[in-house]
Amino acid sequence: MKVIITGVSGMVGEGVLHECINDSKIDKILIINRKSIYYYHPKVEELLLPDFFNIGNTLNQIKDYDACFFCLGVSSVGMDKQEYYKLTYTLTMNFANAIAQQNPTLTFCYISGAGTDSSEKGRLAWARVKGKTENDLMKLDFKSVYGVRPGYLQPIKGMKNTHPYYAYIKWIYPLWSLLAPNTVNTLSQLGKAMINLAKNGYSKKIIGIADINKLAK
């Protein structure tokens, strides 16, 4: 498969990239970044897109890809609601529309998160925005679109972009996964699940925590 990954400068995107590199089903990976991460591997190519709001003709040559793993995102904590909407909904839809024009047989996997509100009417603003993004992505001309909603993510050892606070809480994961397995995923499971979504599809369009664990096996 040939796949596109965004957000590899973040923890989730870096983890998904790691799993794609190690998966024999994938022979080409295009990472799309604002700035270069200077990552070198025979499978990996990098395309710089400094402004995701001004794509222009940049993506016109990106054709015949099998999947896009959209891992780019921002936290809503402390952010103005309009700015969060712009960086979550507007940015994602702008990028996805451009990709869809050239890749109608592509599977688009969008990382949203547990608690995302598909009704777009709930109390939490971030959950409504994520829900609207999922809903409108599913209207685009792709082969398939999946809203992937992980819970707590246990990071992959050795990755560069793991948030520092994980050093203080990662010890609890074994107990957490034993007592409440449907609230947690590993980052490795998330990457493997997305690869299997792209290759084999799935019966659901909203991929929850338990689905991720199932797809990763």
Image (spheres, rainbow, N blue to C red):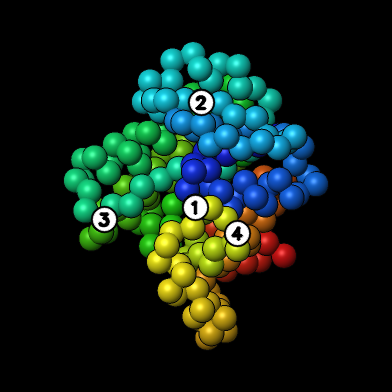
Q: Nearer the viewer, mark 3 or mark 2?
A: 2
Q: Amino acid at mark 4?
A: Gly
Residue behind mark 3:
77
Q: Is residue 66 in sight in this rendering?
A: no
Please state the horizontal and vertical placement of residue 164, each as a whole percent of the image.
42, 62
User: CA separation, marks 3 and 4?
Assistant: 27 Å
- Please say if 98 is above or below 14: above
Q: Along the horizontal axis of the image, is 41 left or right of 182?
A: right
What is the crowding at mark 4: few (fewer than 14 residues within 10 Å), some, or many (at least 20)? Answer: few
- Residue 123: assigned label: none
User: CA separation, marks 2 and 4?
Assistant: 25 Å
Q: Secondary structure at mark 1?
A: loop
Residue behind mark 4:
158
Contact, mark 3 vs mark 4 (Cβ under 8 Å):
no
Q: Amino acid at mark 3?
A: Val
Q: Earlier in the sequence, mark 1 or mark 3?
A: 3
Q: Residue at x 43, y 74 (%)?
A: 168
* Nearer to me, 58 or 44: 44
User: CA separation, marks 3 and 2?
Assistant: 27 Å
- Please say if 169 is above or below 130: below
Q: Along the horizontal axis of the image, is 107 left or right of 133?
A: right
